[in-house]
Amino acid sequence: MKILFSTDTQNPSSTEILFGLLELEDQELLKRLNSTLFPVAYESSFYNQLFSSSVYFNFLAHTKDEYVGLCSLKIEKLDKKAYIFTFGIFPNLRGTGLGTFVLRTLESYLLNSFNCSFIGLHVHVLNEKAKLFYVKNGYNIESIVDDYYADILSPSAYFMSKELKC
Ligand SMILES: CC(C)(COP(=O)(O)OP(=O)(O)OC[C@H]1O[C@@H](n2cnc3c(N)ncnc32)[C@H](O)[C@@H]1OP(=O)(O)O)[C@@H](O)C(=O)NCCC(=O)NCCS
């Protein structure tokens, strides 16, 4: 993992949070950590895609003692757009504001380092907690996509997005 930047201690964990970029050799670590964050098991092809080119980024936020959160996303540099595939905070740290802090820190990084002005993502329609979380962080529900998820009983998702501004 390559450390990209660190924050000061002015965050809900009251300790420095480091933001690292996972590299190909961290693929198994990402799989293992994602299995503790998300109720679905992603296929190997998903992980292969996430490490397949320089448009994909897998961020791991952590303190010196523990993992805080993970985010896998794609950046379309020419269109100045980012798309979040997965975003999660480790279960023992949820509900303390760390999700908001990590998301806002990543948004600033995308804006300042890549000039991204738009972030999109999909959220399962039954994932009320995540929907509320994104709404609270300025994301709008743009549409409902039927059959977004394959092979599950309730496959619909909200497409949500946010304009990023300086
Ligand atoms: C969604 C998620 C990232 C939020 O992270 P978090 O660290 O708990 O978020 P915060 O503490 O910053 O909470 C921000 C807001 O989210 C909502 N929220 C967070 N936890 C909640 C809970 N347990 N119940 C209801 N709403 C909740 C609230 O609106 C909260 O604001 P409040 O604390 O002022 O009431 C986290 O719950 C998570 O990792 N979930 C599993 C993975 C997932 O579903 N990811 C999203 C789809 S990829």
Image (cartoon, grey):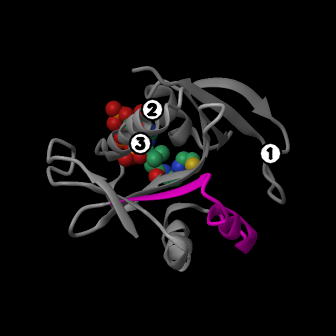
Amino acid type of the residue that numbered disc 2 sits on in the rendered structure: Leu
Helix, strand or loop under label 1 = loop
Q: Earlier in the sequence, mark 2 or mark 3?
A: 3
Q: Label 3 vs label 1: CA separation?
A: 25 Å
Q: Position of residue 135 (x, y in %)?
A: 51, 27
Label 2 to label 3, Cα distance in Å?
9 Å
* Residue shown at 54% from the left, 55% from the top: 57
161 or 116: which is nearer to us?
116
Q: Which of marks 1 and 2 is nearer the N terminus?
A: 2
The C terminus appears in which quarter of the rendering? top left
Circles 3 and 1, Cβ within 8 Å, touching? The answer is no
Question: Depth-wise, is mark 1 or mark 2 nearer the camera?
Answer: 2
Residue range highlighted in magenta: 40-61
Respond yes or no on whether mark 1 lies under 8 Å from ligand 1. Answer: no
Ligand 1 within 8 A of label 2's CB?
Answer: no
Residue at 84% of width from left, 60% of height from top? 151
Q: Specify the amino acid type for callout 1.
A: Tyr
Asked if residue 41 can be seen in this view, the reply is: no
User: What residue sits 41% from the left and 42% below the top?
Assistant: 106
Q: Residues within 10 Å of mark 3 (few under 14, many from 20)?
A: some
- Does the image show residue 36? yes
For disc 1, the marked residue is: 148
Q: Mark 3 points at which residue?
A: 106
Q: Residue under circle 2? A: 111
The x and y percentages for residue 154 are 78, 48
